[in-house]
Image (spheres, rainbow, N blue to C red):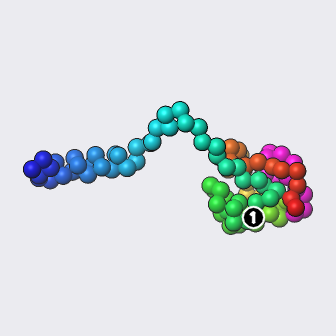
Amino acid sequence: MLFHGPRRRGALVALLLAACVAPIPSWGVETDAVQVDLNRASAAELAALPGIGATKAQAIVDHRTAEPFRTIDDLKQVPGIGDRTYDSLRSSITVSGSAD
């Protein structure tokens, strides 16, 4: 047998795990990432952003209710949104004219 014995089975497991976590090459294909509009997104949509969650999502909704976002930089005015969170979200967010 090709993978008989504990050493060879371990090698097979390592090979399978490496294949599962290896990045998939894009081969030059660009994908359009969907951006979340800070002035129009629901609290659930905002909560799905990395590092946000339900509490920060509600803080974003409360902020835009009081004063709609004019630029994505305004997100840093929301309590709990620091530079690291903002930097990780920059490519995922956008701002429209105002909330409807």
> Measuring 9% from the left and 50% from the top, which residue is drawn there?
1
Quarter residue 80 falls in: bottom right
The residue type indicated by label 1 comes to Ser
Say few, some or many: other residues with alpha carbon within 10 Å of mark 1 (under 14 / 14 to 19 / 20 or more): some
Residue 6: x and y in percent read 14, 53
In the picture, measured across the screen, residue 89 lies left or right of residue 9, that is: right
Q: Main secondary structure of the magenta part?
A: helix
Return the x and y of residue 7 as percentages of the image width and height: 15, 49
Q: Which residues are magenta?
A: 65-77
Q: Residue 4: where, in percent of width, then height? A: 11, 52
Tell me the element at label 1. Answer: loop
89 vs 29: above or below: below
Q: Position of residue 27 (x, y in %)?
A: 49, 34
Q: Is 48 in front, or is 82? A: 48
Residue 11 falls left or right of residue 24:
left
Q: Quadrant of the C terminus?
A: bottom right
Say how many tags the image has.
1
Residue 16 magenta-highlighted: no
Picture residue at 79% right of the left edge, 46% below the top: 72
Report the residue that reaches farthest toward the front. 29
Q: Relative to residue 28, is residue 11 drawn left or right?
A: left
Tell me the quarter of the picture where residue 63 sits. Answer: bottom right
**Would you name the residue on which mark 1 appears?**
42
